[in-house]
Image (cartoon, rainbow, N blue to C red):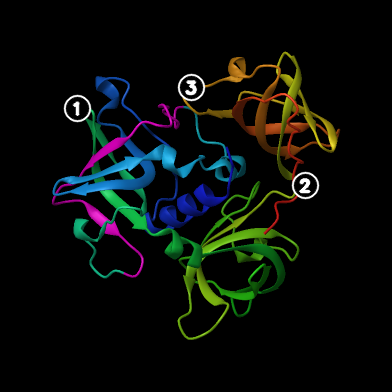
Amino acid sequence: MNWRTRTLIVVLTLAMVLGSASLAFAQGPTGAADSARAAVVRGEVTAVNDDGFTLAPGALRTLALRTLALRTPAPGALRKTPHSQEVTVVVTDDTRYRIPGVENPTLADVQVGMFALVRGTWEDGVFVAQGVGAASLDEIRRRIIQGEVTAVALDSGTLAVDTRRGEWTVHTTDDTRYRIPGVENPTLADVQVGDRVIVAGKPDEDSDNTGTARLIAVLPKNLVKGRGQVTAIEGSTLTVETRRGPYTVVADEGTRYRARDIEDPSLADVQVGDAIFVIGLEQDDGTILAKVIGILGQMAPGVRPDRPDDATVAP
């Protein structure tokens, strides 16, 4: 399985589209008391009919791993389901839509192949939508940049970001939202030169590499990600062999687990010999505090684990 940044792009962009300040990755209902609880589902649109559409969460290949690494959800915010489970979304006359580039969108503008994030409630096994944000992958890519901040101008409300697509000039407004680890009520003044950021917004139609930000997220400086093979497990500590040598990965009560075809995975599902994908924070002693562990399964004999990424996420 290839673990990509695509879901991060999808979730950040659709969160911006929906105007949701706090995402709960809620899936299937667990009881009558939960059926009316507000929730969020996300995935790829696989079918559209007169009453709504079908989402395939597994089509995204991974969850919002870096988003979880940026911010740990509150207890109870995650309601789990098998990743391959399809979700039937039913719309009503009160359902609101946000589709970039479409004025006054309706269900007719939701297309197969789009990625959608839907807010609503579970009722009798189907998800009744209150708000739908949807966009094509090309549109999502067009609205996201990632890179290193090279300049911040507070007087003009702009910052320069060096990306693989060149240097971008990013304008901010009073509506721009910020996510900065460890900073309460962050503003542009909290963004520093050298920060690695993900910016979701709208590119200018008349200027290249210029746009207006709706969301600016600063990645933790000690954020690491990589893949390797588990060679030992002692309590909540894993030894993971990579091409750069062994790493010590520590799980705690805040660690989230992801595994295809395992409902509600946990540390107990990690076995010696498994290939795992880890996103976490490097500690002063060199260990990695895991925010997300993806269980990829047993490695075939002779297969070498992938090399972990650098300590900061590449743009």
Q: Is residue 97 magenta?
A: yes
Q: Spatial distance from mark 1 to mark 2, Cα to Cα?
A: 45 Å
Residue 217 at x, y percent in the picture: 59, 56
- What's under tag 2, amino acid-wise? Ala
* Residue beneath disc 1: 124
Q: Tell me the element at label 1.
A: loop
Q: Tell me the element at label 3.
A: loop
Please state the extent of the stretch shown in magenta in the rendering: 76-101
Q: Earlier in the sequence, mark 1 or mark 2?
A: 1
Q: How many residues crowd around disc 1 within 10 Å: few (fewer than 14), some, or many (20 or more)?
A: few
Q: Earlier in the sequence, mark 2 or mark 3?
A: 3
* Residue beneath disc 3: 262
Name the residue located 65 percent from the left edge and 65 percent from the top edge.
189
Q: Spatial distance from mark 2 to mark 3, Cα to Cα?
A: 29 Å
| Relative depth, front residue between 52 and 218 | 52
Does residue 118 sit above or below 286 in this rendering? below
- What's under tag 3, amino acid-wise? Ile
In the image, taking residue 163 as reference, residue 264 lies left or right, namely left
Q: Is residue 197 magenta?
A: no
Q: Main secondary structure of the magenta part?
A: loop
Q: Name the mark on residue 311.
A: 2
- What's under tag 1, amino acid-wise? Asp
Q: Name the mark on residue 3.
A: none
| Residue farthest bottom in this picture | 206
